[in-house]
């Protein structure tokens, strides 16, 4: 028996990224270049450390993020987007565009969404390519990333 409510693709996606924090963590890795726990903890939305630790573990287990040792500090880990995580960028763009259109955002907070809307899918692909260079292991292809085990 499946532990999923249903095998609907929207349901399955929301089981991984449909909570209050997961997409904000992906947002911070993608757009704010936050890669360490302490940096992610400093989100303006005020995530607690225990919730952040749980969400990071869940996103790593789901294959959206990877976690590796930080070579500059023995007690730190670096979080990276996997190819699966990078492919969430258009979803984040569309959520931002929708939020800017329908919710009371400020000009400053809505500026990134305005840029994503103006640039459209061509800009999103460019940003995804840049994220791939930063987050995926050197020389790893999309196909290899898709096959890499989570965690």
Image (cartoon, grey):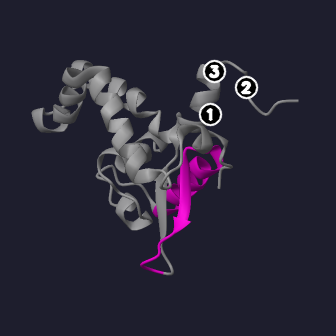
- The residue closer to the viewer here, 55 or 122, is 122
Q: Is residue 96 left or right of residue 114?
A: right
Residue extending farthest to the bottom is: 74
Q: Earlier in the sequence, mark 3 or mark 1?
A: 3
- The residue sitting at 44% across, 59% down in the picture is 48
Q: Are marks 1 and 2 in contact (CB under 8 Å)?
A: yes
- Residue on which the image places disc 2: 5
62 in the magenta segment = yes
In the image, residue 26 lies at what x, y percent?
A: 43, 44
- The residue closer to the viewer here, 58 or 65, is 65
Q: Are marks 3 and 2 in contact (CB under 8 Å)?
A: no
Residue 15 is tagged as 1
Question: Disc 3 or disc 2, which is closer to the eye?
Answer: 3
Q: Earlier in the sequence, mark 1 or mark 2?
A: 2
The residues tagged by marks 1 and 2 sit, at their Cα atoms, a distance apart of 9 Å
The residues tagged by marks 3 and 1 sit, at their Cα atoms, a distance apart of 10 Å
Secondary structure beneath dot 3 equals: helix
Tell me if residue 122 comes above or below residue 3 in the rendering. Answer: above
- The residue closer to the viewer here, 14 or 89, is 89
- Residue on which the image places disc 3: 9
57 in the magenta segment = yes
Secondary structure beneath dot 1 equals: helix
- The residue sitting at 47% across, 76% down in the picture is 71
């Amino acid at each position: 028996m499946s532990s999923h409510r249903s095998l609907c693709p929207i349901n399955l996606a929301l089981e991984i990224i449909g909570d209050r924090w997961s997409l904000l963590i992906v947002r911070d890795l993608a757009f704010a270049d936050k890669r360490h726990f302490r940096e992610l903890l400093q989100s303006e939305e005020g995530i607690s450390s225990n919730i952040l630790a749980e969400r990071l573990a869940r996103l790593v287990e789901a294959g959206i993020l990877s976690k590796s040792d930080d070579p500059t500090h023995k007690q730190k880990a670096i979080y990276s987007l996997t190819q699966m995580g990078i492919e969430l960028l258009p979803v984040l763009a569309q959520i931002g565009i929708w939020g800017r259109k329908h919710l009371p955002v400020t000009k400053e907070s809505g500026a990134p969404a305005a840029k994503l809307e103006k640039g459209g899918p061509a800009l999103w692909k460019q940003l995804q390519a840049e994220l791939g260079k930063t987050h995926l292991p050197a020389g790893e292809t999309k196909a290899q990333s898709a096959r890499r085990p989570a965690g």
